[in-house]
Image (tube, helix red, strand yellow):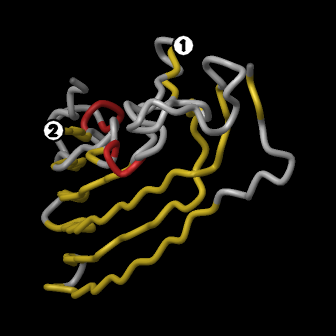
Amino acid sequence: LFITPRDLPTPYVQSWNVNVEHELTNGVAFQIGYVGSKGTKLARLRDANQPDIDGNRVTFPQYGFVDEFATISGSTYHAMQATFRTQTWHGLSGFAGYTWSKSLDDASDAIDFNFATVAFPQDSNNLAAEHGPSNFDTRHRFTAAFTYQVPKLFGPKRFAEGWAINTIITAQSGRPVPI
């Protein structure tokens, strides 16, 4: 049996941030900021007929499993972001950014589209037991992208000008491994 409430509440997310930027020298700036969000009434599946701790099926005693699509989950995200940017300083331009973040929820394991699986909570009567790091929680992330304009080389103008060296670097910590 599968049920979906007729008056399903609408999920929503609240987001906020604050940033401070300072120009260190002409064309070189540093920015640091805080980013946060909170998800409320997020969707997930649960067994609406899971027995309570005494073994009683209180919702639909005539049925076994009753899968319910419900908006009963929540999430939080907090991050500190720092960025160093340069615009043409001795032929070098680009940025380097670091993010430290923490994402917690009780539903990111609910649907895994990569493996087409649906997970139910261990205890549909106690979603607080599911609260923990999100499946996509990436605590540390560093990204840098720089371009160096090579000075004019010797030789014909067509081949001696307009050369640049580009690089992009990304490094991040691993994601949680569900047990």
Q: Position of residue 44 (x, y in %)?
A: 57, 38
Relative to 97, say whether 167 is above or below: above
Residue 142 visible in the displayed image: no
Amino acid type at circle 2 is: Ala
Q: Which residue is mark 1?
A: 116
- In percent of width and height, residue 58 lies at 61, 38
Please tell me whether mark 1 sits on a helix, a strand or a loop.
Answer: loop
Indicate the quadrant where residue 33 lies.
bottom left
* Earlier-in-chain disc, 2 versus 1: 1
Residue sitting at x 51%, y 60%: 39
Q: Is residue 33 left or right of residue 119?
A: left
Quadrant (top left, top right, bottom left, bottom right) of the N terminus: top right
The type of residue carrying mark 1 is: Ala
**Camera-side residue of 37 and 131:** 131
Quadrant location of the C terminus in the rendered image = top left
Depth check: give the residue in front, 135 or 66: 66
Question: Horizontal placement of 58 versus 98: left or right?
Answer: right
Residue 50 locus on image (x, y percent):
52, 30
49 to the left or right of 51: right
- Residue 129 lies, in percent from the top left, at 31, 45
Per the rendering, the mark at residue 99 is none
Residue hosting label 2 = 171
In this rendering, does residue 144 appear at all? yes
116 or 155: which is nearer to us? 116
Q: Please say if 45 is above or below 149.
A: above
